[in-house]
Every structure is written in structure tokens, then in C-alpha cells.
Amino acid sequence: MRLYPVACLFLPLAWVACVDSKKDPGASGSKQMPPLKAEAFILRPMPFQEKLEVPGTLIAAESAEIHPETSGRIARLFLAEGQNVAAGYLIAKIDDADLQAQFVKLQAQLDIAQQTEQRQSKLLAVQGISQQDYDLSMLQVRNLKADIGILQTAIDKTEIRAPFAGKLGLKNISIGAYVTPASVITTIQQTQPVKVDFFLPEKYANELKPGATIEFRVTGSSLIHTAVINATAPGLSLNNRSLNYRATVQSKDPSLLPGAFATLTIRLEENPAALMLPAQAVIPLARGKRVIRYSGGKTEFVDITTGARTTDQVEVTSGLKAGDTILISGLMSARPNSPVQIDKIQNAGITQ
């Protein structure tokens, strides 16, 4: 019972404290968030040349499999494996004894037919025979000459020769082997100069023209070689929607072998006023890309379209203009139309 007067003294003080706490807005713990601190980048036009790296394959300037044109048994073989030969070099000879015998027979028949034609020509001059008899003898001579020509062609086909100057491959037959037109005797490649085949995606199909120079290097070598584009395919490949290019290598380096893998460096036409943005400033979305622009002390989210890119920069093709200030840090913390304080401008000391 003696404690009641003391408790009554504290009740008025508690009520005053509650009233004061309602009047003081700071007592609730709510405070205004400070502005976001971030680094920025000012878009300025600058020259930019897009550089592509694409794979390619070295090929021979000319390449062919050597097949016989007729069937028969190999009588002689002059195949110098791995050696350079001139056009027309005799690689192999098929046995043609039967054809030679027929040739001798027809040649003898032709000699007699020609003698007969000469005698009848003299008789025709003195009206000793009719014109028809002379024409028949002349026809016989011409038929025999035609048969000899056909036979000579068959004999020529028994000689297997190099179709062009180049380097012979490994032999696939030996003397005495029976061959047919389906048999592969060897291969031949013209390796000076070599060419390089490569593909460019559809978007770059009109960027390179015949006469343009490209650079490349082959696996296992740091040497840079140059090649000049001399032709393109007539249309895009249906397999990869890319355009096939062929270029002729300028150097005559014997280490450049057909079939080697090449890495090509292609420099496209320079854009003198490209808008390049640091790659970390771009926010990827499910459908497109976005950046945060500094505008009037606040953030503004802007959708953009990008073009070429390097290891650390991205080309902006639409959505921004020269002079725009773009945030490059604090992107995850930024909210639309929220205050922002620029601590540092990355390219503040660069003028263009």
C-alpha cells in the first residue's frame, strides 16, 4: 500500500514522454537516403576500326587426283613422290601393246589405200575410171586416217601425265597393278602460291571486297602473313548463313602447307565518329541492352542498340548521343529517377 504514491508520480512523466516522441519525427528512426555515389563516362565521338578474328584453312592454288583415262596394267612408273614436276610430266604408262599392233595394221592399210587413190587419180585424168570409183577410193583413205586418229587418241590415254606444274603426292599403285578410271594413282598440288578460305557472318558480307588485304597466322607460328581477297562465293552458305571468301597468300613461305589451320585478322572500314562506351556500363536484358544516363542530378534508364565491341568497349549505334554522361559503377544499386552524385568522370581529361 505504501508504493502507490510513488507509482502515481511516474504516470504523468510517461505521458509527457509519449507526447514528445510523437512531435519529434527523428525519434521514429526514418531518415532520407543519401544520393548514390558513382563513376561516369562522357560519350565523345572517336575513330574506331572494328577488328574481326575468324578461322580459315589454307588450300593449294590447284589440286587434283590423278586417275587413268583407260583401264589396263601399269607397264612403267615414273612417279617421283613428293617432288615438284612440270606440266605434262609422264607419271605412269599403261601397257598398250595391243593398241600399237592395231596402229601398225591400220598404217599399212592406209599406205595401200593411198597408193590406190594415186593410181585412180591418174586414170580419172584420162577418163580411165568414173568419178564414182575415184570417190570410193578417196573415202577409203579418209576412213583409215580417221580410224588411226581414234587409235592414236587411245594410245595417248595410256600415258598418265601431270595436268599442271605442282608437287606430287604419295603413290597408291605399283608396276604391274591393274588400274581403271576409278583408280587413284596419286595426287598433285600447286602450293605456290597457297590460298586461304574463310567465312564471314552475313552481317559483314558486304564489308570486304575483292582486292582487300587481310592478315593471318598459322598454328605453331607467330609470323604474320598477308593475303589479298580475289573471289567470293556467289551467295551465302545455307549451313551457316555466312559468305565464303578466298584470298591469295602474298608470301611464298614453304612452311605454309595446304590444309593448315589459320587465324585471320580482318580490319573493317574505319568509323571516324563512333560512340564507344565501357563494357561495364551496359546492362544486359532479356531483349536488348540498357544503360543509366546522368540527367539533372538523377538517373535515367535508357535502352540502346550496340554494334561492334572490343575486349573492354562497346559501340553504341542508337539510343545515346555525343555528350551524354553514362554511369559505369553503382549500377546494381541505382533506381530510376533516383539522385546520384558523380565522384569521378573516367575520361574527364580526354578531349575529342
Image (cartoon, rainbow, N blue to C red):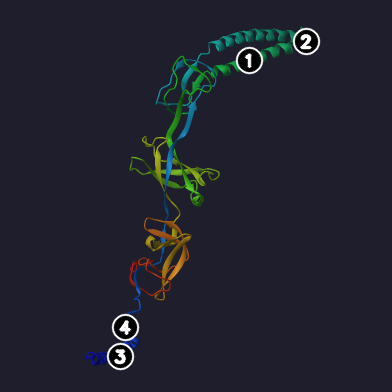
Mark 1 residue type: Asp
Which image quadrant: the N terminus? Answer: bottom left
Q: Position of residue 21 (x, y in %)?
A: 32, 86
Question: How far is disc 1 from disc 4 in space, using C-alphas?
Answer: 121 Å
Q: Which residue is mark 3?
A: 16
Mark 1 nearby-residue class (10 Å; few <14, some 14–19, many ≥20):
some
Q: Which residue is mark 4?
A: 27
Q: CA distance from mark 3 to mark 4?
A: 14 Å
Q: Disc 1 designates what residue?
A: 147
> What amino acid is at disc 3?
Val
Q: Is residue 171 above or below residue 334?
A: above
Which disc, if any, is residue 178? none
Horizontal relation, residue 62 to residue 15: left or right: right
Q: Residue at x 29, y 92 (%)?
A: 12
| Residue at horizontal 70 percent and vertical 14 percent from the top | 139
Q: Which residue is mark 2?
A: 130
Name the element at disc 1. helix
Q: Quadrant of residue 251?
A: top left
Question: In what element is the residue under mark 2?
Answer: loop
